[in-house]
């Protein structure tokens, strides 16, 4: 069996027709859901690309691996999905985005060259790279946002698109007369991107995925990792006018959210992004385009499905559909992600397991709490590789796929956010080390603990499913908060760094140390336990004289 | 300035005359205390050699570095004292014991050869090795406890001591007629070890330390790390009969401790070691020898002091005296260490700073709470190297040495213990992942939290300074426990793994991202902040058209 681990970027959990979106139809993703299990309560480990992905690729919590925000390097030696799969004879390949920043200083300290096979895997978060393109090729006066080479930009140039950065000038811009109309300005969102649809990012990456599958020997897990529907919000024809303002779902917000707001929430809501997305004209301009981007993504999933069927591989390829985080799109007076309301912190998650053992769950929905790192454990488990429990903190979802009772279901889900690099950190004047938030959610409650002496946030999901009322300092909810804090503290003391020794090795050590001669508490020969080997020589007590 | 970082092994905090021992005179260590600052409330990070030392050498908590027990490898790439000192041009050398277990699997994964300079430092916990000898050369039917070469055994052989393992047969054994009387049997403790005193372990290591100082270019920090007064409890003449039963201090224990005991405490107390040390005849046999071993240690400190004075180096050598943990010696019905009563978890700590800036604190005592990892930070600080706050969790003690108010004194001290490899884990049937305890202590209270659903322990240090009454489940102390749990939870959410990016680098990232072209929330050209560079080209919004 091979595994297609498909990740979109910034795809909301509820922007799929199988997840209930009333006007956006995603028949191809729905088809996977109809063959697999759709998880309705899947949480990302962090509502920001880099941290979420480092968790997805290591199976570990953000505060366990430490790469807590975009561009924070993942420390050299941190074990990844690739390590676990390759140890079991399964390839682990990248086609698309990871947002991985290599730990160059750590590699230098260990004398590890990025050009070596080992160094390359360390630099690429454990993947062997078919094609890496992180999809953000912005350039400003200080230089590029991302200094790597862009295979996608090279592709565009090979197709005759002009200039240094056709990603910006064509794929992510429209035309205003003869002038480039940048996709960075949301007023331009509804212009068709100035590019042939087949040359735009999502179809290009799909083509790479198909090339990969044609070329690569099995078994493999391939991370097909699309940048879209992530901003810039602009899409080529015909997707640019498939949806209009009448197709968008109503915003979820309440003016009361802005009264006595939590300081962190206030800082995000009052920032440029929050202000822009609080405008209804911006939502009406941007969301139809976001939907168009998703529609294009779904069509490309259709291409993948056709390829699998045509080659007969649909019968032995597991397919996972997910995202790294969501997008507020104006809900809660916010844009982007960063905080823990559902549109940001929940992710779509659909898993199709082609094997007979998953027959009884096809087309079902699982409402249990699951996390992104559980997908990592599931992939390792599905590939029949060992899930090292002292390293991987995720819990395999295979029981859900096979219709078995989960032996260890989650009582609560955790997500984290480190805003030390965000301007909000400066605005509310929190030291970098304290700029951290922890979300704990059950089906009924969501608590957000904030370091730095800031108050918590609390939402009563049972009675306020839209999370419009922050009860974090409401005296009536002391008990509810305390109950959620019990979960947080339980989690915070988890064993996360004992990564160099397995539980099996520990069990082996757990013998009464005497067999290698260290014997404590012996007063005399008679104290040597009968169970021990009788003949200790030289350095160890001699029991034969008894 | 050079730094002598002297560590003894299993030296109780209260077995020094400067710390109040009534019959054991340690004039040389006292002399250092008279020139420096003695810390009365110093806690080890873990009451077991390996974990305590990995914390001492990294400046990080046990659950941060993950090498949680003896023989649990320290993960490759974990930053050490040596990394921080060498980055500032100061050598970091080992003379003696570390208990370091290299992360061989991690090194192999990174293609790192243990024979290279980098690989050797990774294998030796960041030290350059003058001489490593962990001091436990036991051999049993399954082979040696420690498979490395023993420089000390090689020394003994070169001096004509016979056999494969003169460490065991001479240095740690007496004679019973013509038979070897092993030091593993405590009935033999009062026999003189069958070795010339000058050839025994502590003088041998002191000689190595002096050779090191003669040979090594400066500046350096040298970790002079003695195995003694660690068991086997046996010492050569004249130290074997310097003290007798009348010199030992009364045991600290109460039969009530064994009534309704905490399950973990009960398992330790009922084990072989606890049973043996609960016998008064064992204490009377062993403790005078333990005192003899300490007396020999103190005499060897005297040799080091004389060397420094003779070479004029006493004026520019910082001296630190400490231990990795203590020894119960029968207190609380226990032997060895492993738990968190003062005899086990507190360590002696004396720091002499030769510089003018420390004049006003000479001969003083500091009663503030400090931890072993604070010594690590102090060394880095004293060597005028940068203490990387995103890596090192210890807090420099320099303010205490210089008589300044500490800007960040500890409200509570933390220590941890992982008993997953200990037979106790099997006895009380706790899964390996849950076999972890966390101590939080203030001046007035000590809480021990136990994972695995076990109850906590609580001691009222103000009213029960001998810790004879465990109030962990006493209903009258709910509030006291809750207050201590607040500290534990505060600590448990600390930022410990963001090691690849410094706070300074984070502050630099905390700009409004537009200067590299990623600009969010812009609706139109007028939204581009004035502060940004005006001329965005190509890929970024063009503000010049405004």
Image (cartoon, coloured by chain):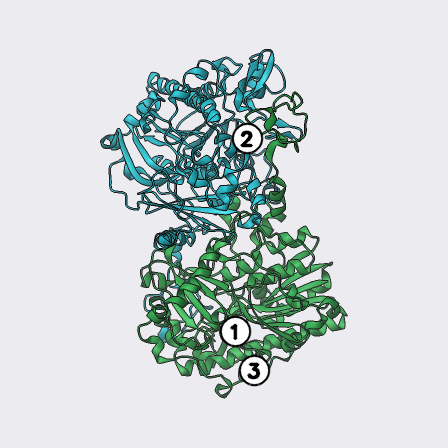
Chain colours: A green, B cyan
* Residue B274: image location, x then y, percent: 50, 34
* Residue A504: image location, x then y, percent: 63, 46
The residue to which callout 1 is attached is A12
Asked whether residue A132 appears in the rendered view, the answer is: no
Residue at (64% x, 61% y) in the render: A379
Looking at the rendered structure, the number of numbered marks drawn on it comes to 3
Around disc 3, counting alpha carbons within 10 Å, would you say few (fewer than 14), some (14 to 19), or many (20 or more)?
many
| Callout 2: SS | loop
Q: Specify the quadrant of the image occupied by residue A395.
A: bottom right
**Residue A24 numbered mark, or none:** 3
Question: Is residue B199 rendered to the left or right of residue B522?
Answer: right
Query: Which residue reaches farthest left?
Result: B360
* Structural distance between the alpha carbons of marks 1 and 2: 60 Å
Give whichever of discs 1 and 3 has the lower sequence position. 1
The residue to which callout 2 is attached is A520
* Residue B337: image location, x then y, percent: 47, 35
Give whichever of discs 3 and 2 has the lower sequence position. 3
Q: Which image quadrant: the N terminus of chain B? A: top left
**Foreground pick, B540 / B344:** B344
* Residue A372: image location, x then y, percent: 55, 63
């Amino acid at each position: 069996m091979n595994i297609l681990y498909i990740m979109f970027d910034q795809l909301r959990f509820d922007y799929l027709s199988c997840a209930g979106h009333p006007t956006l139809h995603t028949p191809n993703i729905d088809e996977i859901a109809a063959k697999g299990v759709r998880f309705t309560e899947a949480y990302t480990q962090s509502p920001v690309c880099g941290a979420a992905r480092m968790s997805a690729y290591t199976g570990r919590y953000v505060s366990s691996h430490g790469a807590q925000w975009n561009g924070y390097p993942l420390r050299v030696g941190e074990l990844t999905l690739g390590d676990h799969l390759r140890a079991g004879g399964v390839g682990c390949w990248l086609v698309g985005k990871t947002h991985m920043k290599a730990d160059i200083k750590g590699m230098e300290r260990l004398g590890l060259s990025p050009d070596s096979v080992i160094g390359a895997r360390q630099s690429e978060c454990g993947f062997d790279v078919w094609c890496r393109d992180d999809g953000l090729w912005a350039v400003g006066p200080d230089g590029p946002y991302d200094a790597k080479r862009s295979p996608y930009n090279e592709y565009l140039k090979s197709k005759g698109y002009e200039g240094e950065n056709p990603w910006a000038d064509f794929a992510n811009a429209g035309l205003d007369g003869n002038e480039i109309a940048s996709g960075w300005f949301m007023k331009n969102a509804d212009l068709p991107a100035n590019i042939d649809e087949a040359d735009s990012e999502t179809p290009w990456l799909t083509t790479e995925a198909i090339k990969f599958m044609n070329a690569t020997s099995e078994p493999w897990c391939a991370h097909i990792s699309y940048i879209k529907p992530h901003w810039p919000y602009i899409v080529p024809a015909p997707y640019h006018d498939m949806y209009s303002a009448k197709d968008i779902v109503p915003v979820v917000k309440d003016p009361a959210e802005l009264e006595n707001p939590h300081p962190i929430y206030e800082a995000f809501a009052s920032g440029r992004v929050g202000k822009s997305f609080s405008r209804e004209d911006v939502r009406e301009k941007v969301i139809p385009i976001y939907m168009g981007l998703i529609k294009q993504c779904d069509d490309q999933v259709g291409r993948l499905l056709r390829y699998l069927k045509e080659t007969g591989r649909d019968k032995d390829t597991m397919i996972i559909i997910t995202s790294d985080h969501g997008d507020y799109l104006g809900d809660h007076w916010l844009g982007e992600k960063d905080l823990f309301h559902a549109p940001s912190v929940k992710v779509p998650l659909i898993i199709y397991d082609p094997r007979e053992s998953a027959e009884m769950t096809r087309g079902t929905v699982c409402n249990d709490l699951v996390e992104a790192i559980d997908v990592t454990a599931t992939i390792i488990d599905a590939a029949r590789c060992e899930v090292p429990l002292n390293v991987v903190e995720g819990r395999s979802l295979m029981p859900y796929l096979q219709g078995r009772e989960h032996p260890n279901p989650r009582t609560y889900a955790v997500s984290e956010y480190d805003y030390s690099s965000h301007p909000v950190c400066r605005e509310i004047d929190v030291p970098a080390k304290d700029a951290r938030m922890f979300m704990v959610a059950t089906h009924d409650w969501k608590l957000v603990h904030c370091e730095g002496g800031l108050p918590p946030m609390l939402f009563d999901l049972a009675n306020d499913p839209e999370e419009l009322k922050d009860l974090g300092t409401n005296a009536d909810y002391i008990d509810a908060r305390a109950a959620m804090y019990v979960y947080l503290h339980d989690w915070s003391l988890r064993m996360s760094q004992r990564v160099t020794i397995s539980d099996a090795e520990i069990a082996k050590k757990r013998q009464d140390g005497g067999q290698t001669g260290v014997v404590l508490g012996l007063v005399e020969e008679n104290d040597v336990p009968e169970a021990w080997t009788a003949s200790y020589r030289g350095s160890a007590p001699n029991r034969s004289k008894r």
